[in-house]
């Protein structure tokens, strides 16, 4: 890892401890993003290069009651391929596994929360030049 990237990571870790769950994450420069990807892929040349996740499932997870963010877990799917399993998390950073609903009769019920997968793994090489000039 480059010295500038190490300094940036330390600063970000310090900032993250002072944020709420909903505030985690921020835009970074194209150059930093490209450097981070290149560093990882150089250190892990046989690992999965990236994952694609559709907007619809992200919106469904975030629209669950009390959801403040999403947590991604490294996992293996049924075919043994590396994937991500992702779930909503509340403001305390805890996985949302169920939530309370109101039934048609006006009582309370319980729904299982969304646990998602079905990412598309991308094993193509990262093209730094294309990314930086787009």
Image: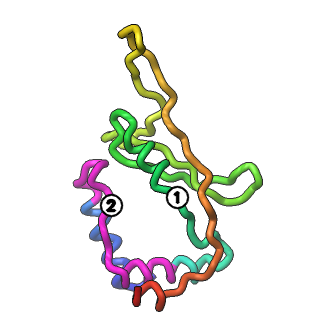
Q: Please indicate whether residue 16 sits to the left or right of residue 46 in the image.
A: left
Which disc number belongs to residue 71?
Answer: none
**Spatial separation of the CA atoms under disc 2 and disc 1:** 17 Å
| Residue drawn at (63%, 57%) of the image | 83
Residue 107's x, y, as percent? Answer: 38, 9
- Residue neighbourhood size for the residue with mark 1, other residues' Cα within 10 Å, grouped as few (<14), some (14–19), many (≥20): some
| Residue drawn at (64%, 79%) of the image | 45
| Residue drawn at (57%, 79%) of the image | 41
Q: Name the residue tied to disc 2.
A: 25
Q: Nearer the viewer, mark 2 or mark 1?
A: 1
- Farthest-out residue, right: 79
Q: Quadrant of residue 29?
A: bottom left
- Residue neighbourhood size for the residue with mark 2, other residues' Cα within 10 Å, grouped as few (<14), some (14–19), many (≥20): few
Q: Are marks 2 and 1 in contact (CB under 8 Å)?
A: no
- SS of the residue under disc 1: loop
Mark 2 or mark 1: whose residue is earlier in sequence: 2
Q: Quadrant of the C terminus?
A: bottom left
Residue 25 forms part of the magenta stretch: yes
Could you say which is closer to the camera, residue 84 or residue 134? 134
- Farthest-out residue, front: 104
Q: Is 102 placed above or below 70 here?
A: above
Magenta residues, as a range? Answer: 16-39
| Residue drawn at (41%, 47%) of the image | 59
Residue 125's x, y, as percent? Answer: 61, 82
Q: Name the residue tied to disc 1.
A: 53
- SS of the residue under disc 2: loop
Q: Quadrant of residue 90?
A: top left
């Amino acid at each position: 890892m480059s010295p500038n990237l190490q300094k940036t990571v330390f600063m970000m870790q310090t900032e993250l401890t002072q944020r709420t769950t909903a505030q985690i994450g921020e835009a970074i420069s194209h150059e930093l993003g490209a450097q981070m990807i290149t560093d990882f892929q150089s250190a892990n040349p046989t690992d999965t290069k990236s994952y694609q996740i559709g907007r619809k499932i992200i919106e469904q997870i975030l629209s669950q009651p009390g959801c403040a963010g999403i947590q991604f877990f490294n996992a293996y799917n049924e075919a043994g391929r590396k994937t991500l399993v992702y779930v909503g998390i509340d403001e305390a950073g805890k996985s949302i596994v169920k939530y309370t609903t109101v039934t048609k009769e006006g009582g309370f019920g319980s729904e299982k929360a969304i646990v998602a997968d079905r990412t598309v793994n991308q094993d193509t090489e990262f093209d730094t030049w294309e990314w930086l000039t787009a």
